[in-house]
Amino acid sequence: MVTAKVWVLKKHFEGFPKPSDFDLKKIELPSLKDGELLLESVFLSVDPYMRPYSQRDMKEGDIMIGTEVARIVESKNPAFAVGAFVVANSGWRSHFISDGKGLHLLPSSWPESLPRSLALGTVGMPGLTAYFGLFEVCKMKPGETVLVNAAAGAVGSVVGQLAKIGGCKVVGCAGSDDKVAYLKKIGFDEAFNYKTVTSLDEALRKASPDGYDCFFDNVGGEFSSIAINHMKKYGRIAVCGAISQYNDSVPQKGPYVQIPMIFKELHMEGFIVTRWNNRREEGQKALLKWVLEGKVKYHEQVTEGFENMPAAFIGMLKGENLGKAIVKV
Ligand SMILES: NC(=O)C1=CN([C@@H]2O[C@H](COP(=O)(O)OP(=O)(O)OC[C@H]3O[C@@H](n4cnc5c(N)ncnc54)[C@H](OP(=O)(O)O)[C@@H]3O)[C@@H](O)[C@H]2O)C=CC1
Ligand SMILES: CCCCCCC/C=C/C=O
């Protein structure tokens, strides 16, 4: 008999999530039936989407949604061998039973030099978000200028590096001087700390006096209202996330987008990465290749211990992560 630890949403978040909104519980797992496998989580992901999705899709008492890299410890399913690793969407659980549906096996050829946690970050969902958002939504072209915010995070850091691979000038902003130094280290042409600049408007103009062809927006809110005025004519805005609004109890008010969209003839498109689930393999192959070639660098903010899942999640929302926020069991 295996006892699984799980984190439950005890109370719907009001404003910023707090530790008392979560509960750690234990569940006795039954023995396996034919076709099933027992898995233990090795790395778990904490992501911004958990904040708005919990509000929309979860009820109090539900196990927190989320993705993990897990090792198969027992198998009564011939398609899954003991010792193999998978990416699963099984939520915040230390152990779980699966019938194999929806599991993505990590290739047995996963390079020794790379941590398997990258399957939750640079070569996982966040990396794919950068890949499809830039190539399919922004449709960036060589020689263009790309702006990305939350640039030192899981998605943003890949966006900037892919834009450089694609022959663009890249401007990024982040919330600390250390993050800005990191952006310069990984090849961003211009980077600034949006929390300390005296004027965001001036910082955006200084970084690219001619404006921006593409804006990969992870933040929304006030930042985006200012940035939209710096778009070039026919610019494209990929609305990826709105983390500055996820914890609002009262919705923020404008300025509104219509006037700059009309006069600059902008294209603004929201997207969710799962739109390209049928091209997941293509994206992961490309990202893995660039990582192995050293063209895409990665950093992970690893929190040790399953019991620290809420702390890692809250810390990520506060901006404590450089690169992908990961919990190592
Ligand atoms: N559409 C889609 O399919 C997907 C969308 N997303 C979205 O992409 C965005 C980035 O996700 P991800 O890379 O995983 O997360 P990150 O690794 O970037 O972590 C979140 C970061 O957001 C920044 N942040 C937090 N609050 C604010 C704020 N009020 N204003 C500006 N920045 C803030 C912090 O960095 P800093 O120190 O710079 O403030 C923090 O580190 C999110 O909005 C997320 O919802 C992610 C995956 C898929
Ligand atoms: C269970 C994994 C689903 C990932 C979908 C992420 C979409 C993110 C949207 C905003 O953050």
Image (cartoon, rainbow, N blue to C red):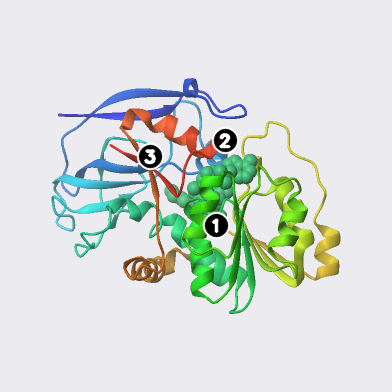
* Residue 272 disc label: 1
Q: Is residue 274 visible?
A: no
Marks 2 and 1 close (CB-CB < 8 Å)? no
Query: Foreground: 56 or 71?
Result: 71
Marks 2 and 3 close (CB-CB < 8 Å)? no
Query: Foreground: 21 or 219?
Result: 219
Earlier sequence position, callout 2 versus callout 1: 2
Q: Write down the quadrant of residue 240 in the picture.
A: bottom right
Query: Foreground: 148 or 242?
Result: 148
Q: Write down the quadrant of residue 94 in the picture.
A: top left
Residue at label 3?
91
How far apart are the two marked residues, 1 and 3, measured between alpha carbons?
19 Å
Quadrant where the C terminus sits is top left
Q: Is residue 118 visible?
A: yes
Mark 1, other Cα within 10 Å: few <14 / some 14–19 / many ≥20: few
Amino acid identity at mark 3: Gly
Please report the residue visible at 35 percent of the width from the left and 70 percent of the height from the top. Answer: 285
Amino acid identity at mark 1: Ile
Earlier sequence position, callout 1 versus callout 3: 3
Please report the residue visible at 51 percent of the width from the left and 35 percent of the height from the top. Answer: 58
Q: Is mark 1 within 8 Å of ligand 1?
A: yes
* Secondary structure under the numbered disc 2 in the rendered image: helix
Query: Foreground: 10 or 257?
Result: 257
Amino acid identity at mark 2: Gln
Residue at label 2?
55
Q: Position of residue 72 (x, y in %)?
A: 19, 47
* Residue 144, above or below 55: below
Mark 3, other Cα within 10 Å: few <14 / some 14–19 / many ≥20: many
